[in-house]
Amino acid sequence: MLVVQKFGGSSVANAERIKRVAERVWRTRQAGNEVVVVVSAMGDTTDELIDLARQVTSDPSPREMDQLLSTGEQVSIALLAMALQALGAEAISLTGAQAGITTDGIYGKASISAVDTRRLKEELAAGRIPVVAGFQGLAPNGDVTTLGRGGSDTTAVALAAALQADLCEIYTDVEGVFTADPRLVPEAVKLPAISYDEMLELACLGAVVLHPRAVELAKIYQVPLRVRSSFSEDPGTVIKEEDDMEKKRVVSGVAHDLNVARIGIFDVFDRPGIAYRLFSSLAAENINVDMIIQGMTRDGRNDISFTVSRHELPQALKVVEKVKEEIGAKGYTYDDRVGKVSIVGAGMITRPGVAAAMFEALSREGINIEMISTSEIKVSCIIKEEEVPRAVKALHRHFGLENLGDKE
Amino acid sequence: MLVVQKFGGSSVANAERIKRVAERVWRTRQAGNEVVVVVSAMGDTTDELIDLARQVTSDPSPREMDQLLSTGEQVSIALLAMALQALGAEAISLTGAQAGITTDGIYGKASISAVDTRRLKEELAAGRIPVVAGFQGLAPNGDVTTLGRGGSDTTAVALAAALQADLCEIYTDVEGVFTADPRLVPEAVKLPAISYDEMLELACLGAVVLHPRAVELAKIYQVPLRVRSSFSEDPGTVIKEEDDMEKKRVVSGVAHDLNVARIGIFDVFDRPGIAYRLFSSLAAENINVDMIIQGMTRDGRNDISFTVSRHELPQALKVVEKVKEEIGAKGYTYDDRVGKVSIVGAGMITRPGVAAAMFEALSREGINIEMISTSEIKVSCIIKEEEVPRAVKALHRHFGLENLGDKE
């Protein structure tokens, strides 16, 4: 079996942990598998490098930031290759460029455009374990580019896809994907398996176990993923295409997100181009808008509400202030003390009434819903921040998620 | 004028110093010069990376060490390029590979085999300041290789040679080349100029201001060097081909080295191949032998003495123990409490009696000479370690070196 194993920053935070990772990789190799390893930068290295850059200039150029940050992973791959060699393994560290990863050349948030697998296949054929730097790749002009958020997970999935690996294992500091955050819901259970679409929704809705970008790539190339802890032997959670078994699971998990702020704009003109004007102005400032709700028209006027990340609220309000006259707004409000709770489940598509059941559960708890947004496999509600923990617990109980645990 | 400026680790040890270096580079550029910058890793970065590797394994592979250590310079170039950009300069960081530096591929101690200057010339033509990582280059197989000791100085000289630069400035934490170590000899003065050959001898004899390897390369390609401090405006010391003015200077400086141990072997066979057997065995263990003295034959027997670095003494003694019967030695002694004092001067060649004057000065101080070694432009003596400071002072006075200061 060909396995790609990816280890995050906390898994390689110091020499001791790097040695433990090496032991795990070596066990996988000795069990008869071919292994390609992808690693992130050690612990807080990336933050330290960013801090160093800030000490030098408040406005570092993206090219130089990439030249700087890419060293973090280069340190990890060298150290992990050494640790593997010390165990008797044949290992070789490869930077993104050496591993054949090319990108579109956009500094700081490059996309992988191709993986030339020749070098990797040569190393595998020679019996070696390639240890590849995550988060980076070679730009067409020969520069180093980093992949931005979720970059190392994405590297692992891209290599697994290009090599047609049998499995891509993502090692992290949690044991897998849970029905809810165990810190909020003690009865939350680890799911043995989940579909790409469900994982994608959960990842977008605040479950930080895996970056949506990597899940999306895995779905496109049908790369089977396994999320598991580098600190235990638990088999973790498998993420794959949904099958009938999973379809039957109406709700797979409850997600929550406290990094939410809501903006409401009153009485904007009800005519074409208003929404475009507002949201393109926000996009131009690189502000990510999550939920958007537009109510019914009343007297040729509309209300528009939307949510953004909390730290982007001040910037978003500036944009609103700038465009408010143009869109005819009579005023606006904002609230940064809100949170989002969501239920996710592939089975929702075929089962009407799931959203209603969610609203019922929240209403029984006396929780007021401020905004609602639905997709085929999820329902999200914006509620008061302080009610989020109670809401998550109630939803977990209401949908009986404590029964979804490991019974593979 | 095209100037290559090289800044060592202490000159870029933190963000503040990096900004100061940027200001200096920018001033040089604004004075109408083209500038190429070469930097070392920040402060103790290299030692910290070595320490990290040691925590992972006692025997890291040279390839992975190079992959690891080369990140140190990559961090510095990115930060310095950012600092230059913050001043309004157009700057671009280049790794060794990006700057077109290829090596012979020997990990940990590679030699530069070629510099493809196309990229550098393009950047210069575009008005940019290339900031190049010292100490590294691309191996023929695409791996990163480091250049070993003196690597960053060597990078700077190699780039200056390849670009036919008008000057190569080596910035360090001392103000230039002194007639003796000012910590030992308060009257020591900074030399305004010195020849390649003299600098080479001084560098080999313990003056750590510049690595002999870089001086040698500068001599071959006739690259004018200037050694100066990054913490002052002092013009430093120029190192160039000797001219008549300098030839007249019989003694230019007194050097000393405390990292010396002496081994003496008694009564070895006086027949061909004995020296070869001994010193090839030492070379096979990578032990660097400095001075070698073989006395006169007595009764078909010889004594051989030689010196090694102190930290290599235990290893050297093991080799001696192994070969002593084969070479017929009746016994051996060693002493790691010795030191070396040397006088260097291009004018010695044409002036007999300089060595005698040295011996006279030492004898007046009551200092016993244990070994003597001479070359065309230097005389070195091994003496007791504790007498080294007194010897250096006496020689400095005896040859009137306090009069050699800045009078350009």
Image (cartoon, coloured by chain):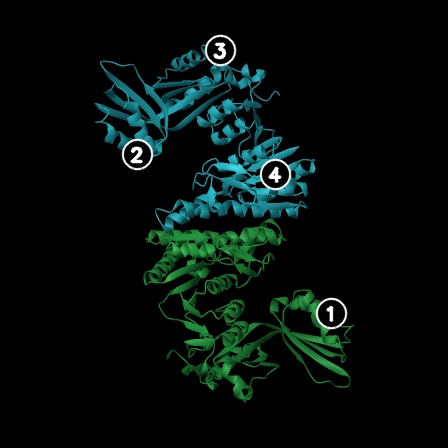
Chain colours: A cyan, B green
Distance from Cα at disc 4 to Cα at disc 3: 41 Å
Confirm whether circles 3 and 1 share one chain: no
For the residue pair B221 and A197, the one nearer the viewer reads as B221
Distance from Cα at disc 3 to Cα at disc 2: 40 Å
Local secondary structure at mark 3: loop
Q: Chain of mark 2?
A: A
Residue designated by label 4? A36
Tell me, yes or no, whether the two marked residues, 1 and 2, touch with CB atoms within 8 Å.
no
Badge nearest the viewer, 4 or 1: 4
Local secondary structure at mark 2: helix
Confirm whether circles 4 and 1 share one chain: no
Q: Chain of mark 3?
A: A
Residue designated by label 1? B321
Local secondary structure at mark 4: strand
| Mark sitting on residue A315 | 2
Badge nearest the viewer, 2 or 4: 4
Q: Within 10 Å of the Cα at label 3, are there few (<14), some (14-19), or many (20+) other Cα atoms? A: few
